[in-house]
Image (cartoon, helix red, strand yellow):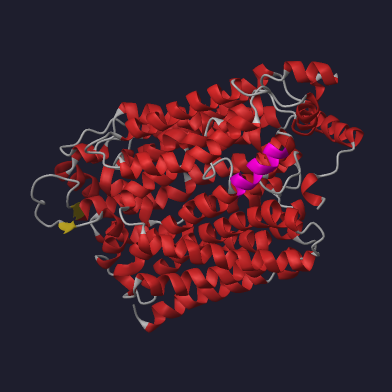
Amino acid sequence: MTGLDWAVVALVIVLSMVAGMGVMRLSSRNGAISYFTGDRNLPWWAIAISNTATYQSGSGAFVMLVLTYGLAANWLWWSCWIIWMPLVAIIWAPMWRRMRIMTTAELITLRYGGRPAQFARKIYAIVCCFGFSVLLIGYITGFFARTIAPLVQMSELQILLIFGGTTAIYTMFGGLMGVVVTEILHFGILMVGCTVFMFMAVAQHGGWSHLLAHIAMVRPEALAQTPPVVSSSPSNSIGLLTILILVLQGIFFAGSPTAGEGSTAQRFMAARNERHAMAGQLFNCFLALTFRILPLIGIGLVALSLLWPAGLTQGPPPEGMTVIQDPVYGWAEVIKRCHLPHGFIGLLIAVEVAAYTSTLSALINWGGSFVINDLYRPLDPHATPKREIWVSRLTTLVLFAAASAVAILFVKQMLGWFIFINSAMVIFLLPLAFFRFFWWRFNVWGELAAIILGLPLSLLIWFKFDFQDASKHPIWQGLSLLFGLSFVILIITTLLTPAESFETLAKFYERCRPPGFWGPIRNRIGLTATTQPLFRGVVLNCLLGILSCLGLVLATNAIFVGDWSRMVGGILSACLLGGWLVHRMFQPEAEARETKTVELEKTLNKAPTSEVP
């Protein structure tokens, strides 16, 4: 790192702080509502870019996956994401917006009634804030520190204090609007930097044809486009059972705090209206599944041709390849083996900083929203907007401090943590996405069972019983065990305890209007079906969305190995089916349905719960 490199990094940090703090007045205009929802005024394109930037967290993770498992590695998350992302756009995004709440915890007191619901809301807020949020921040912070450490010659603590500390500062003052503005800036930096670096790295190592030929010689299984991936090392294989459990998980992933809920749902709550929420998630599908990772797959292929991960591949390394002890260092090792102009390494560090701080700022703001809306406001219902803002800002600092401790003390085996964060940590909660919204009989006791048991059981099974070790237990075993336990426990708990009162269920249905098994409630309150689409139409839209996303990801891998027929077929199916889906979702009939929805809300005259202390 030269002085020019550090100047580039400093410039990106300064631009981020200016952008994030530049909206400070807007973020504090109406207290917590402005700070955590941006006064519900986000346009669709900002929702999409913001969510995609939040998911990124860093380039190193994707390079690590490709280096470990090969080109098919992305199916470890694609299998799930091509399902939940369109489902959320079609079903959940409009519901989150029309409920007019500030946090997913607030849903609990809308969906259930009485003191148990108040208790469950607080427990859920604590788990999301000090459990999921802190673990997620700790994971991405540890990953970021290990990714750039070989290049910056700094300790992990120094990296956290400099880059994480500046992020916490502008997030503290800018609120959600500050987060979104900086995420848009960071996403642009990320895409430009990664794309330029990919072309430079490929050109300096012989071009695409040479890279593919060399990979085919040393690790031929790494060029498989789809699972299963069979390798000489059991821990380096992806089986069909693993993919199947991830597909099943995707159907329910709308309930994950790392996916359909969490900061993703926060953006829907902040949308201008339901149509902006849906359009934002549809655009997010394209950006998140394909666009953002194109250059990272290319960099991963360069890493495959240069590096030999110790312990993940058997036998001596081929001539000319470098052994690395941990694939998490793959991104930095590729940079070291490229001849880059002065200042460009600084740009690449800035790219990682941008990716990391985008995710960090979103998670801090999301975690803080639970503290204010679900824990602090009930204790101080008459707090002034100014006091709410300052408590919100202090909360961001506390969250970052706790997460930094987790990153330094606990986050060690990055590959195991990658699978845990993206699957095992949340899988016990996933059935909630369906039970809450689609089954009127589900009650607060089932909710409490999932909230209280979910995270401890996930940590116990994944780390204590060592299900993270793929050589002992294939990935699907730990995931299916957690998912099966969740279904059995939640259903039994619900059926053994009383249902919610009709008044509570009617209030929730009138505000949310979910699909599914709500016939007894819908019939008693006398609502017609004119304010929501027919069930068969929703199912068709979901199938169109899933198939169009499948076409996108098939085309993505095909580009890199020159499988032109698969690439063209994938692109055509994505465009045709996706275009049909957009037409169905935004045709005049759907617009008329939304107009009737707005009229119904006015008739019901229900005040937004999160805007009343």
What residue appears at the point 22 percent right and 33 percent down from the top-left corner? 230
Residue 14 x %, y %: 55, 76
Q: Is residue 259 visible?
A: yes
What residue appears at the point 75 percent right and 47 percent down from the top-left corner? 272
601, above or below 536, in the image: below
- Horizontal relation, residue 163 to residue 496: left or right: left
- Horizontal relation, residue 326 to residue 365: left or right: left
- Horizontal relation, residue 147 to residue 353: left or right: left
Residue 269 x %, y %: 70, 46
What residue appears at the point 80 percent right and 51 percent down from the top-left corner? 611
Count of numbered circles in the view:
0
The answer to which of 405 and 365 lies nearer the viewer is: 405
512, above or below 4, in the image: above
Residue 420 x %, y %: 39, 44
The answer to which of 290 and 600 lies nearer the viewer is: 600
- Highlighted range, magenta: 115-125
What residue appears at the point 51 percent right and 63 percent down from the top-left corner? 357
Main SS of residues in magenta: helix
Magenta span includes 122: yes
Q: Quadrant of the N terminus?
A: bottom left
Magenta span includes 304: no
The answer to which of 377 and 67 lies nearer the viewer is: 377
